Image (spheres, rainbow, N blue to C red):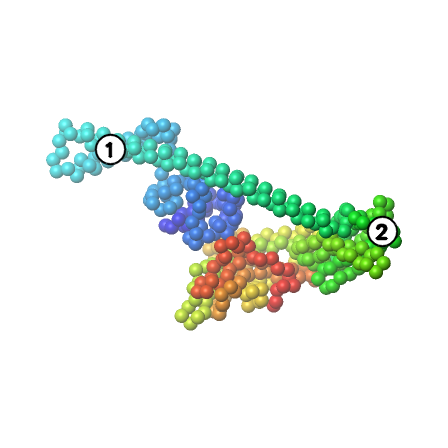
Amino acid sequence: MTTGQRIAAKRKELELSQESLGEALGVSRQSIYKWESDTSLPDIDKLVALSRLFHVSVGWLLGVEEEQPETPSPETASGELSDAQLRMVEEIADRYLAAQPKPKKRRLWPYVLAALAVLYIGLRLMDRLDRMDNQYNNLSNSINNITYSVDRQINTITNRVEEILKSQNDLTADYGTEMTGWDLSQNTVTFSLRVVPKTYVAGMEVVFLADSGDGLAEFPAEEGPGREFTGEVTCELTDSITLSAVFVNGDTRQTQLLDNYSGLYQDSMPQIDLSGLESCFLHEERGEDGLFHLPEDYGWLRDQELDTKFGTVEVRGLKVGLFKNFRLVTWLEPCEQPKNWDVSGEQFFRFDAMDMDLEQGDILHFAAIYTDQYGRQGVAPSIPYFECFGEEISWPDDSDGTPYYGFSNYVF
């Protein structure tokens, strides 16, 4: 068995999913998938964590020990021999004596003592290795804590510099934006805005601007107590909405960016978990004909979160497709759950084997395209995505998921 097969076998014995094992170890489901498919090995600290979780040795996980060692007893931990270990010593001595042509009884004791010494040294060495593992974990945690502390200080300094530069170029003494309502049937969202000019001039007017991707829309502001201007903005609900204030003084117009809201449209759509389908890309290399020959594979949809931050949303239509550089290559066919597949899914899809001509840097991933009860369309990309690296397909080392693109960026 390979290391990946051993990890998968022990995970299934404990009735753990890849997600739950990843949560227990503090890694992603994709990391567990890579380990079990033997495309990567766990780090040393994760190997130690796996050995403790599975109650096996690190050596067994790596395949250097054929049998899983029994859990050490308190006597073993203290250096004393257990009954099982004494029986092992006797067996070693018997085997050695049987190999001798004419054993002499008066010379048995040196071999027994030698076997005892070897076993004792081995036990002490195992105890020392375990202590070294603990020391390594402590050192690793210390390094991680230091790295986190340095990164946090750098981020704090960077944010502070940005705040200073912004305040120097800011036209406002104070401002605020807040999302106050929405109408999904009209696919609109409403914001409440307020600004206090840094330099106030009698007769000054303020106009609020909203840009949701189809051009600017203007909304008047009213002056109130404390020279504060307030107003409401209603615009199309998209994944990128920019709100600004224009200070009008005679013929002079000065614009100040107030806020940018990203991903609101996607947040208003149900979150769909599209799983499987990764194996059709793994370890695929370009054939002699210059094409990549992708095998048949299956995917499935897990539980769908229909309650969004904007209320309950219903899925009225859903299709799954393969996308190359966010352009549709082919739709997948809905199918029954494959035999011998022990997974929980509400709906299954089959990817038929196909040949693809790919160039360096081409991005491949699957995505679910769906419609809600208002006729709005959303997209749920699979994770991870894959990239063509010349002669093979793999996922980028620095990829935590599929690059975020809204529905409007997909072509099908």
Please identify, in this view, whether the residue under mark 2 or under mark 1 is nearer the observer. 2
Q: Quadrant of the C terminus?
A: bottom right
Q: Position of residue 158 (x, y in %)?
A: 62, 46
Q: Residue at x 56, y 57 (%)?
A: 402
Q: Residue at x 56, y 44 (%)?
A: 151
Q: Position of residue 346 (x, y in %)?
A: 57, 55
Pointer 2 residue? 201
Callout 2 secondary element: loop
Give amino acid for label 1. Ala
Give amino acid for label 2. Val
- Left or right of residue 65: residue 358: right
Residue 209: which quarter of the image? bottom right
Pointer 1 residue? 115
Q: Residue at x 65, y 45 (%)?
A: 160
Residue 292: which quarter of the image? bottom left
Callout 1 secondary element: helix
